[in-house]
Amino acid sequence: MSEPPFARSRRKRVRHWLTLETTSGGLLVAAALIALVWANSPWRTGYFDLSKIVVGPPALHLDLSLASWATDGLLAIFFFVVGVELKHEFVAGSLRNMKEAAVPIFAAIGGMVLPAALYIGIVLVAGDPGALRGWAIPTATDIAFALAILAIFGRGLPTALRTFLLALAVVDDLLAIVIIAVFYTAGINILAFVLALAAIALFALAVRMRTPRWWILLPLAVVAWALMHDSGVHATIAGVLLGVVVPAKLLHDEPRPRTHHYEHAVRLWSAAVALPIFAFFAAGVSIVDAGGAGALFAQPVVTAIVVGLVVGKLVGVLATTALVTRFSALRLPESLNLRDLVPVGLLTGIGFTVSLLIAELSFPGAVQSDGAKIAILTATLIATVLAAATLRWDSHKAR
């Protein structure tokens, strides 16, 4: 029996709503709030017991806790979408023309270098060299969350502003992926890594077929992920590489590139399932068990992350843009000036998803872990409020 038209229409509307930038941002916030409330409630042991439940076959080294499945498994879906977006932007999108893309690329680099430098300086001055491993935490930008805030509060602003933020955030994600692969990989099982690359190569061939079959692509993706996980390289890198090999140019007289098709097909699972579940397991910090908010916020890592994300990102983006446009032939689009980029600089201070991931990789089980997570959530809140207020003001003036 075929599905009634009204049911298909309703399902399509629900799917569209779940994949909206505003909805995905709301789901992230809701999941993080639920985790925080539960982790500080009288029933908090249930939250941490749930996180530690082990699922998976030991023979394949996949007997992981639910929290690890969220970090290593579900987050790979999000990074697949990131990889597809990277491919499309560099081949057919806003990063295709290097002359136009150069300014946001340099801005992204400046917006990562300064927060890292501020973080290192603060923890060294505070006498906590053990926290240096978390230097990359304030370098990340949550592209989904940042675009959601821009969509909600930036109505009426030039389209070039969103394009600049998207290009900057995409480059930011790319550099964050490189950082995770290079600095947070302890050791590599060469055989497993090579086999993972071979599975990704087969996926690249299969995804270019005239009619790609999901029952071929999905098993290849799972095998590539499992082998990457076994290699010691963070498994989310497999998601990125799988996304990058999806063709961005038209094939076989198709009406749209396959990057669009697969991004559309997977975004629902990323926005409505993977990211909220990851946020739920990653954001559950017990302030009560840490000795209270005073003890938690007294950690040098907290100050370093908040300053890095809120101040370092803003100053790094704006200062780099000012220097590049002042001392080179590169220019901003005619519809933008440096003042217009203030909310963009604030939005890049929303680290959230990728920052939480780097925090877990930096301090696995260490005393700084809870401090780093609460700092990320605090910085995200501050950056969101400041960016929303600035966008609202600019939007009001533009209208």
Image: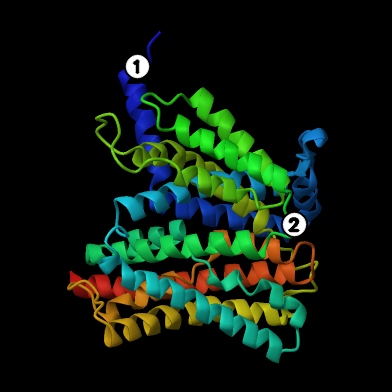
Q: Considering only vertical position in the picture, is 352 above or below 274?
A: below
Query: x, y (%) of residue 126?
Result: 71, 89
Name the residue at 51% across, 81% down. Answer: 114
Query: x, y (%) of residue 367?
Result: 79, 70
Closer to the chain start, of discs 1 and 2, is: 1
Which mark is drawn over residue 332?
A: none
- Quarter of the C terminus within the rendering: bottom left
Q: Name the residue under label 1.
A: 4
Q: Disc 1 versus disc 2: distance between alpha carbons?
A: 54 Å
Q: Is mark 1 on a helix, strand or loop?
A: loop
Q: Name the residue under label 2.
A: 187
Foreground residue among 293 and 222: 222
Residue 371 visible (yes or no)? yes
Foreground residue among 367 and 35: 367
Foreground residue among 145 and 190: 190
- Dot 2: within a 10 Å radius of its alpha carbon, few (fewer than 14), some, or many (20 or more) residues? few
Q: How many labels does the image show?
A: 2
Name the residue at 36% across, 25% down. Answer: 210
Name the residue at 51% across, 34% down. Answer: 203
- Quarter of the N terminus within the rendering: top left
Name the residue at 23% across, 62% down. Answer: 159
Compared across the picture, whether 273 is left or right of 1 comes to right
Check whether the beta carbons of the residues at disc 1 and disc 2 lie within 8 A of each other. no
Query: x, y (%) of residue 132?
Result: 70, 77
Frontmost of labels 1 and 2 is 2
Compared across the picture, whether 159 is left or right of 241 comes to left
Residue 69 visible (yes or no)? no
Amino acid type assigned to the residue bearing label 2 in the image? Gly
Query: x, y (%) of residue 315?
Result: 43, 83
